[in-house]
Amino acid sequence: MTDARTASLPDRLPLLRRRGLMRQATRAFFQARGYLEVETACLVPTPGEEVHLRPFRTRLERPDGSTRDLWLHTSPEFAMKRIVADLGLPVFQLARVWRNGEEGAVHAPEFTMLEWYRPGADLDGLMDETEAFVRRLLPPVVSWNGVTVAIEPPFERLSLQDAFARHVGADLLGTEGDAAVLAAQAGITPRTGEGWEDLFFRLLLERVEPRIGRGRPTFLTHWPAAQAALARRDPAEPRAALRFELYVAGLELANAFDELTDPVEQRARFEADRARRLALRGPDPDAAWPIDEALLDALHRLPACAGIAMGFDRLVMLATGAARIADVLWQP
């Protein structure tokens, strides 16, 4: 059902025309940089391993009467990394993805994800390229949700450790695993049953995110290793992983990794995440699926590379000033 706050299709047409132009500009940007556009399957046996994401489950029926559970993917990441492992080429995709239980002003259960992977790039190189892309796609100044930001270089690069020191008054990495110490440094009382991870996300949401990406776009970098299951650890600080998120005008826009290529470590991380997910969800058939053995088999061939997932609909929201994601979707 269309949200009553969503404008009619004729009223939204200028926004949708802008969306189309931005799709064309996206393809031109990556093709000019030597990227290959790919298309991967939406129905997959393994939709991802994120602890808190909820995929849509469906059932494949074969002509012989046999059936198999499949899922709509939450990201094309696993499939795209297998392509990079096989071809060694930079690739990009404007992919439709699905996440159950997500709906609101900036969330939709079905949306478009722009993902790209570049062999030979590290996190700094990927931030350089991401900044160039965002500056190409967005106007010089954007206003969204009452925040006005100039899209000009250089974008801020701020580690989570420094962000927590600045905005929370806490030693994030030094407190990892100890919610009581993190709460004491933050000057708050933990909620009943609130562990370190829950408290970390609460402080990130309440104290850090409202203060970044507002004076200028901000890359929030070097996340605690437990919060970046597909990223390499920072050789200079093993407690942190080589991950960044990009915030513009208070809107989280992208998530990126310097990709982990060790299949043994990746399997261990997957198994740990699966155990946490099943502990949270219990005997839920919508939370259990096989590990992606094809990805693990491909990781030893994956060249050093960095990859990023960007919410394309949110990028259109920033470009147009649309208040709700439904306003920039053809059929919300």
Image: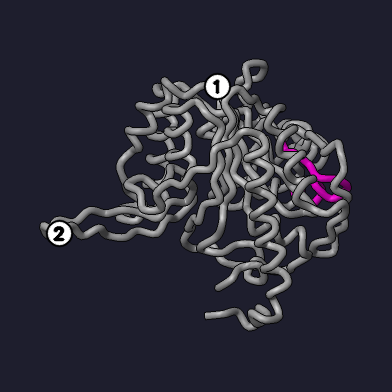
> Residue 75 or 31: which is nearer the viewer?
31
Amino acid type indicated by mark 1: Ala
The residue under label 2 is: 63
Kind of residue indicated by mark 2? Pro
Q: Percent position (x, y) of residue 199?
A: 63, 45
Q: CA distance from mark 1 to mark 2?
A: 42 Å
- Measured as percent of width and height from the top left, residue 121 is found at 63, 25
Q: Which residue is mark 1?
A: 304
Residue 19 higher or lower than 277, as above or below: below
- Residue toward you, 67 or 116: 116
**Residue drawn at x 55%, y 60% as measured from the top left:** 111
Q: Which mark is residue 220?
A: none
Question: Would you say residue 227 is visible in this rendering?
Answer: no
Foreground mark, 1 or 2? 2
Instruction: Find the residue positioned furthest to the left.
Output: 64
Span colored in magenta: 207-220
Q: Tag 1: Cα neighbours inside 10 Å, few (<14), some, or many (≥20)?
A: some
* Label 1 or label 2, whichever comes before in sequence order: 2
Q: Up-down: is 182 above or below 191?
A: above
Q: Quadrant of residue 294?
A: top left
Instruction: Determine whether 248 is above or below 58 in the image.
Output: above
Image quarter (top left, top right, bottom left or bottom right) of the C terminus: bottom right
SS state under label 2:
loop
